Image (spheres, grey):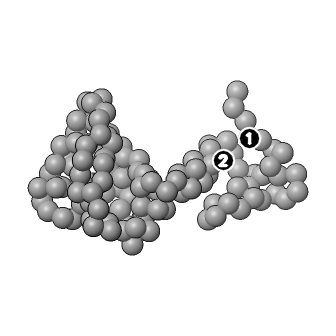
């Protein structure tokens, strides 16, 4: 059965990693969510997690910083409506279709023009 590695807290009841504070009193679910946030935010790639309908659940800090937004600005909103894709309605419609396909388990990588640093991006859905 999964458990929390309590050896992390031998010197202190809290452990801070970037903006995340792990606590010896966290339950397993909270501990896992915090570890996932630490891993996600340490990735330099722009990474996000969407629900099956394309609503934003999580976005890593690199992607948020690149767009100059905060997670609560886009959490629970359609991914294709986020600032990165404000290039054109055509781009947003294309992205919405990619998310729909991903919901059908058609995971693929697509080229997609993004709005950050005037670069092109590959999107894996």
Residues 63 and 16: in front is: 63
Q: Work out which residue is located at the far bottom of the displayed protein and give it.
A: 68
Residue 74, percent from left and from top: 35, 62
Mark 1: give few (<14), some (14-19) or many (20+) Cα within 10 Å: few
Q: What residue does disc 1 label?
A: 4
Report the side of 51 relative to 91 (left or right): right
Report the side of 20 relative to 46 (left or right): right
- Disc 2 secondary structure class: helix
Q: What residue does disc 2 label?
A: 31
Whether residue 37 is visible: no
The quadrant of the picture occupied by the C terminus is top left
- Disc 1 secondary structure class: loop
| Residue at image coords 41%, 51% | 48
Q: Earlier in the sequence, mark 1 or mark 2?
A: 1
Query: CA–CA distance between discs 1 and 2?
Result: 7 Å
| Residue at image coords 21%, 65% | 86
| Residue at image coords 16%, 48% | 94
Mark 2: give few (<14), some (14-19) or many (20+) Cα within 10 Å: some
| Residue 45, image quadrant | bottom left
Q: Work out which residue is located at the far right of the displayed protein and give it.
A: 11
Residue 61, percent from left and from top: 49, 62
| Residue at image coords 88%, 57% | 11
Whether residue 67 is visible: yes
The quadrant of the picture occupied by the N terminus is top right
| Residue 91, image quadrant | bottom left
Residues 116 and 103: in front is: 116
Q: Are marks 1 and 2 in contact (CB under 8 Å)?
A: yes
Q: Work out which residue is located at the far top of the displayed protein and give it.
A: 1
Give the tally of numbered discs.
2
């Amino acid at each position: 059965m999964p458990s929390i590695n309590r050896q992390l807290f031998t010197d202190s009841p809290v452990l801070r990693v970037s903006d995340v504070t792990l606590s010896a009193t966290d339950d397993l679910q909270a501990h896992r969510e915090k570890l996932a946030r630490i891993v996600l935010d340490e990735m330099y790639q722009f990474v996000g997690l969407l629900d099956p309908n394309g609503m934003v659940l999580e976005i890593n800090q690199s992607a948020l910083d690149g767009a100059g937004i905060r997670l609560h600005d886009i959490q629970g909103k359609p991914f294709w409506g986020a600032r990165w894709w404000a290039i054109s309605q055509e781009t947003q419609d294309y992205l919405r279709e990619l998310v729909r396909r991903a919901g059908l388990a058609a995971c693929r990588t697509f080229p997609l023009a993004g709005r950050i640093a005037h670069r092109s991006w590959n999107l894996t859905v």
